[in-house]
Amino acid sequence: MIEPQRTPASGVLKVSAHSNPNSVAGALAGVLREKPTAELQAIGAGATNQAIKAIAIARSYLHASEIDLVCVPEFTDVEIEGNVRTAIRLLVERRALAPAAQTT
């Protein structure tokens, strides 16, 4: 079954290969404390690596708030200076921690 493209609840967090994953994680955690979803966008392997690290770090930031994360990756086309590039779109959704995860 093909699902329709999802729309984020807030602005897109654009991640580059030079982004600090701790800073991105803080921004992501802040958005997810307020909204049910957030979106990260990365173009290239380095940027995607930093974005994935940020999601992992954000999970630890949100653990005390009993929030866990689910990530839905997909490809998307973006236009940059008149050129169309393929980006990775990481839709991050919050969910309650599983009971087993709350006790650790």
Image (spheres, grey):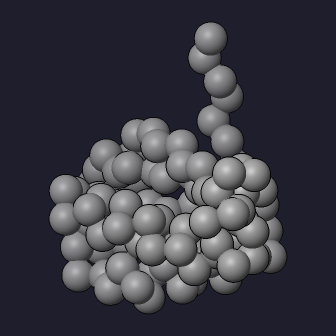
Q: Left or right: 96 with respect to 11?
A: right
Image quadrant of residue 4?
A: top right
Q: In the picture shown, does residue 98 fall above or below 36?
A: above
**Residue at position x 71%, y 62% in the image:** 102
**Residue at position x 36%, y 79% in the image:** 21
Quadrant position of the C terminus in the picture: bottom right
Q: x and y percent of residue 17 in the render?
A: 22, 73
Q: x and y percent of residue 32 in the render?
A: 70, 71
Q: Left or right: 78 with respect to 16?
A: right
- Spot the residue most to the top: 1
Q: In the picture shown, does residue 37 fall above or below 19?
A: above
- Spot the residue most to the front: 103
Q: Left or right: 40 with respect to 68?
A: left
Q: x and y percent of residue 68 in the render?
A: 65, 60
Q: x and y percent of residue 89 in the render?
A: 46, 51
**Residue at position x 32%, y 85% in the image:** 20
Quadrant position of the N terminus in the picture: top right
**Residue at position x 45%, y 39% in the image:** 74
